[in-house]
Image (cartoon, rainbow, N blue to C red):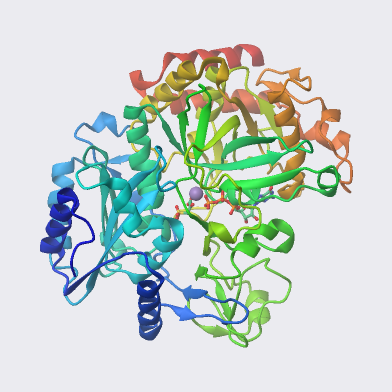
Amino acid sequence: MASLTKNPNVNKWVDEMIALTKPDKVVWIDGSEEQLNVLREEACSTGEMIKLNPEKLPGCLYHRTLPNDVARVEDRTFICTSKKEDAGPTNNWCDPKEMYAKLTPMYDGVMKGRTMYVIPYSMGPIGSPLAKVGVEVTDSIYVVLNMAIMTRMGEQAFENLGDTSNDFVRGLHSKANVDPENRYIVQFPEDNTIWSINSAYGGNVLLGKKCFALRIASYQGKNEGWMAEHMLILGIEKPNGEVKYVCAAFPSACGKTNLAMLIPPEVYTKKGYKVWTVGDDIAWLKPGEDGRLYAINPENGFFGVAPGTNEKSNYNALASTRKNTIFTNVAINNDDMTVWWEKLDKNPPVNATEWKGTKVNGPEYIAAGNKLAHPNSRFTAPAVNCPCISPEFNNPKGVPVSAIIFGGRRAKTAPLVYQSFNWQHGTFVGSIMASETTAAAAGAVGVVRRDPMAMLPFCGYNMGDYWAHWLEMGKVLGDKAPKIFNVNWFRTDDEGNFIWPGFGDNMRVLDWIIKRCEDAVDAVETPIGYEPKPEDINVEGLEDVTTETVKGLLSVDKDLWKEDAKGIHEFYAKFGDKLPKELEFELEGLEARLG
Ligand code: GTP
Ligand code: SPV
Ligand code: MN
């Protein structure tokens, strides 16, 4: 099939990939519905995808991956820069030459008997000065159909690139034999290149997402004066119609999609407050002409965690999945070919197929201690489906950011919310983030680990240089910089129950944050930062939470924090002289204030 572009750089690279992988057939993805329909039919005829109930879930498809291929694999993810220190102590590193030499034989002829799909895509709105183009070649229809939802895919991306530019990210993916022993997710930031092999799962293979929009883009952002962050973007509309935008960085499966789409509690909706979603996972941020920081969402859909999503916890996410959505590793209700996952409702299907593909009696299977859906099962839903998608979603300029919020899962240490003293201290607050691990990555769940800015698995260069870049951006933005906050929805009581109701009620905390940005409310200075006066968190309409509860949620246990500071010293020590001295200074300041 003929190429869709005259761009010689693209054509040369695609030819090289064809020569390497030797597919039987090459299909250029133009992005048309006709072409996508042919691929959907083909995938359903081979069993790769399953068509769901056309009345209840129109346009929806189901896919299950191999049980050994259900999450990102951080230990098999590499940053290959010529110098080891440019990848830094938190990334797996390998010399690019060595890595190319190791992987090239694995790709040699890997697409024999298969079709190669060439996917042009734009990360960011078409025509946006902040957008960037990628081309992914893959032997997976599942990847094509997901990229069709997650990105602006097809010929239009080549219009953005033009006929001569060489500024596109080259992504090579083959599922090969889906062999976990030979699975590699490799970024070559210096070559604008990503090679992924032996996986067919989400973040490992939808190369526009974590591999490009975070790992490669964070590296580009450092060199070009912008930032790529693991952040949601939301707009809070106030009763007077004004909209304030905030970005929030939480680690994987720690609540970004939920916060991005929240429905405020009645005390707020009846006054006229509303929340608009711009993005739920990734933000690209750049100073605008007015000197403020502007954010775009490079994605075009949501690759969201299914379990826990329901009418109450996230009405808007659930509504987004009712048409033209792909479900991965959830359970099927065979009576009506719909989908089910833990906490969707209280009625697991009796005639169920669990995520690995075995027919089971749902209630009995669960009673025996099993899960019907994998904990990291996901939906891929088009952003246009979201009832609260922001009118600014496609704005090529992005939205101006008033506040940046960090957060993680901490059972004890971190309070409900606090504000940093300034940008430099805020960078410190982001750098010391820690969170309990989740099912979004392979490995143990529930272990506390440092996850600076929620970027530990996604920073495409030395984290010390990344912090320096943050500090530099603060200098560029000056007094127009967003205010920086930290939140924790996950404090638990002695029985391990979450104390804060979370979800829609997180609006009560956002309210205080916005007021702080407007200088409309006072704060209390504590050793760790500014905290709300407990009575300034609105608890009207809450059943189990009083101002007294809030007071508890805001308490700072100095001994726990002193213990934490020791851990931070150890963590910082890994970075040697790459650690910005400003952060060392902030850590000393914290310890001095703790006494
Ligand atoms: P990634 O897509 O992996 O980056 O995840 P995410 O950060 O978008 O997380 P998501 O919003 O999908 O939430 C993951 C899990 O956290 C779900 O099981 C939610 O039910 C749960 N969760 C989200 N928000 C809250 C909250 O405010 N409180 C509590 N207790 N749980 C929450
Ligand atoms: C995450 O793990 O942070 C995700 C899902 O958003 S994945 O696309 O697999 O990275
Ligand atoms: Mn994520």
62 vs 287, nearest the viewer: 287
Q: Quadrant of the C terminus?
A: top right
Is 48 left or right of 231, judged from the image as shown?
left
Image quadrant where residue 221 sits:
top left
432 vs 318, nearest the viewer: 318
In this rendering, the answer to whether 484 lies above or below 248 is above
251 vs 235, nearest the viewer: 235
Q: Where is residue 45 in the image (x, y as percent from the top left)?
A: 38, 85
Instruction: Please state the total of marks drawn on the protein image.
Output: 0
In this rendering, the answer to whether 514 lies above or below 298 is above
Q: Where is residue 116 in the image (x, y as percent from the top left)?
A: 23, 68
Q: Position of residue 491 (x, y in %)?
A: 70, 41
Q: Where is residue 401 in the image (x, y as percent from the top left)?
A: 58, 31
108 vs 408, nearest the viewer: 108
Is 463 left or right of 193, judged from the image as shown?
right
Residue 438 in sight in this render? yes
Q: Residue at x 65, y 75 (%)?
A: 366
Q: In which quarter of the image is the N terminus?
A: bottom left
Residue 307 in sight in this render? no
Q: Residue at x 33, y 41 (%)?
A: 216
